[in-house]
Image: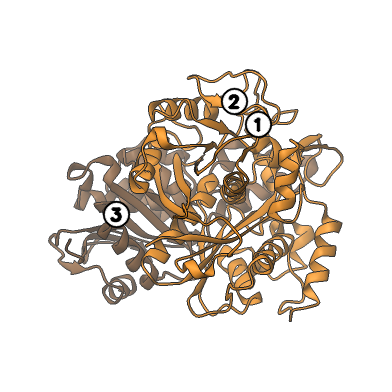
Chain colours: A brown, B orange
Amino acid sequence: MENRNYISSYCAVKEGEVIVDHSTSYSEKTLPSIDFIKSVYKHFQLNYPKFYKMDHLCKLAFVTSELLLKSNPVTQKYSSEDIAIIIANSTSSLEIDTEHQNTISDKNNYFPSPAIFVYTLSNILIGEIAIRNSIKGENTFFIFDKFDPDFMSSYINSLLNSGKAKCCITGWVDFYENKYESFLYTVEKEKGTLNIEHTSEQLKKLFNN
Amino acid sequence: MNVFVASDNIISPLGFTSSENFEQLKKMHTGVKRIENSDLSDEAVCAAIIDTQKLNDEFQKQDLTSKGLEKEYTRLEKMAILSIKDCLKQNPKINISGKRTLLVLSSTKGNIDLLDASMSSKFDRKRVYLWETANIISRYFQNPNQPIVVSNACISGVLAIIIGKRLLEDNTYDTVIVSGVDIMTHFVVSGFQSFKAISNEVAKPYDSKRDGISLGEGCGTIVLTNDPGLTLNNEQQIIVKGGSSSNDANHISGPSRTGDGLFLAIEKTLKEANVKAEEVNYISGHGTATLYNDDMESIAISDAQLAAVPMNSLKSYFGHTLGAAGLIESIVGLHSMRENTLIGTYNFNELGVAKPINIIKNTTAAVVNNCLKTAAGFGGCNAAVFFQKVQKN
């Protein structure tokens, strides 16, 4: 089997900007983190009521994945069990972990809630993307100090080369203390319009842009 | 290429080595106890907790022989370090500080206890990041590679074994230390209490009277290698033959009613292992003892034509140890294979799940040449991994 794989589409949401496949599709530099993410949701008229229940991390993952899959609707091309979702970040779910901790730290004001607690797992954002798009393939959430193009490219290439997935939605989604950064992309055997080989070097370039 | 088990360890309330744990399981002794007046919860809670004094004493003993790099280690780090150390003691051939040795850490919450105000002054804030926790454990053993952290709810442990296998097959490493660890905290207990998911008694997996989970803490470590020469001469060789994960794309905090996600993970795993359903000797189930999880599993197992295969849950012995569960329960499977002994499901009396499955009630002798380990978790994730004995010619 051909061992090359390609980045067929990507979406980055950071520093008040949304970039899809090299071009800025929305920019709003004045809003603080979560307000900016909500403004992305409104700007692109992403109609999904569950969005409002999500924590900040999942909201960021949701808007990024929606715009990625709008640009490259892989769910129409592959069967649900052949699409993998493999995402990483640095701060896990610490944003909502802190919120849950605040609900239990004072015995006189004790109010832990399942609606918060359920989000205290980083892989819930994979679940949200899977549910939204009926994707049933491999899923894994990794935690790294920084985005690791070497590991991610080699692990995902081998997943595709061994036939364990035909397409992978992957990348980085991080939200903590008002800092946010997301970069999701699709990897396929086909070149797609972007025609960027899925190598560590290419990934580094795209991520740092 | 084959991926072999080179060593394993379990740290739990039942013991600090795999053998100690397995001896207790054979006698069907549980580590879950009713705990009152603790820092974990205002109400009494049934859980499997490691005695802090014992943990600290053991760590102190071990630490004398090494150059501790940190002033102090957290409860979670101590468990993981002790667990890995015991693996090295069991099999001195393992080169932990080698260039081609990697640590894969599985944990859902890591040092989450450090968020509590009483702890935050004792340790650097950075310590709550899972990658830093992994760095500290890896540095303790002077391993030169950046560790990999898997944090994928309750399938983390099974997933970490699968990832270890794949990295060895890619020939990036010769040895992968897969360690899964989570601790009991007020954070986790309060969350599951808010879900009303915790039973007032010891959990009753697959039972008609089951009413929720028991929580637990612990660590399990499996050392994997692609070098058969690294396995122990006097021990039955076991390989990891297949593994897969999936999502049921149904609900973030409830399993699919149809079990299709778990079914898919099992199907892909058996296909990779090149094994037919009727060849499976034993299933180590997830068996959290919630109403929905156990029903879902019974449907998936039944749909996979595995309903007759002896199956157990170990959650009524160890509690649900979250990121450690997949490791701990797989290791028990390894010992069941080596000793040809299937462990009875503690607290199981009468089957009460959606589809009939073959739950092991009492510990029994049986030929166990292989083991299918399954897991499911929040976020709709499912995973399965398949272990098999290497038959000598």
Q: In this image, A5 relative to B200: left or right?
A: left
Q: Position of residue A88 (x, y in %)?
A: 43, 60
Extreme residue toward the front, this view: B393
* Helix, strand or loop for disc 3: strand
Of badges 2 and 1, nearer the viewer stands: 1
Q: Residues within 10 Å of mark 2 (few under 14, many from 20)?
A: many
Q: In this image, B56 relative to B351: left or right?
A: right
Give the letter of the chain under mark 2: B
Residue B247 makes an appearance in the image:
no
Q: Position of residue B217 (x, y in %)?
A: 70, 49
Residue B141 makes an appearance in the image:
yes
Which kind of residue does numbered mark 2 sit on? Tyr
According to the picture, the residue beneath numbered tag 3 turns out to be: A168
Which kind of residue does numbered mark 1 sit on? Thr
The residue shown at (46%, 52%) is B391
Q: Position of residue B91 (x, y in %)?
A: 63, 68
Mark 2 touches mark 1? (CB < 8 Å) = yes
Q: Does label 1 lie on the same chain as label 2?
A: yes
* Helix, strand or loop for disc 2: loop
Sequence order check, earlier mark of 2 and 1:
2
According to the picture, the residue beneath numbered tag 2 turns out to be: B206
**Residue B314 falls in image quadrant:** top right
Name above or below for residue B112 compared with residue B102: above
Q: Position of residue A185 (x, y in %)?
A: 28, 59
The residue shown at (54%, 25%) is B358
According to the picture, the residue beneath numbered tag 1 turns out to be: B345
